[in-house]
Amino acid sequence: MIVDSDSPLGKVASGVCDLTAHLPDPDVTFLCSICFSQQWPCERFDVAAREVLAARLSLAALIPAELHHRPWPQVLSGRDQARLEKVIHRVQIGT
């Protein structure tokens, strides 16, 4: 898919890639497909989801419907929190 880098989706393209990469396999929906030792939703999914939401985009189109009801982790590592804050700032100033 080609998306304009200045569009709301384009500004969080790396977050969308992380979000979709960390979705669980259809047969094992309780484990992250990349972070095999972590339950899904994993911390990396949570960070990516927050980036997408900070851009005021809906997660519903990016996540299979059968996973919409699952809660997200609430704890972010310091590094992930800093990354999220940078993305939110970039989205807010429109760069």
Image (cartoon, grey):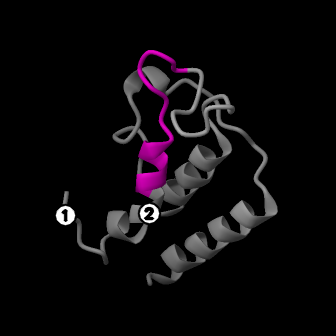
Vertical position of residue 95 compared to residue 59: above or below: below
**Which residue sits at x=59%, y=21%?**
30
Q: Which residues are magenta?
A: 16-29
* Location of residue 88 in the rendering, given as x and y in whole percent from the top left corner: 58, 70
Task: Judge whether residue 35 is colored magenta.
Answer: no
Instruction: Tell how many labels.
Output: 2
* Location of residue 56 in the rendering, given as x and y in whole percent from the top left corner: 46, 59
| Residue 41 lies in quadrant | top right
Quarter the C terminus occupies: bottom left
The answer to whether residue 56 shows anywhere in this view is no
Q: Pointers 1 and 2 in contact (CB under 8 A)?
A: no
| Residue 42 lies in quadrant | top right
Residue bearing the label numbered 1: 2
Vertical position of residue 61 compared to residue 15: above or below: above
Q: Secondary structure at mark 2?
A: helix
- Does 84 sit left or right of 15 as displayed? right
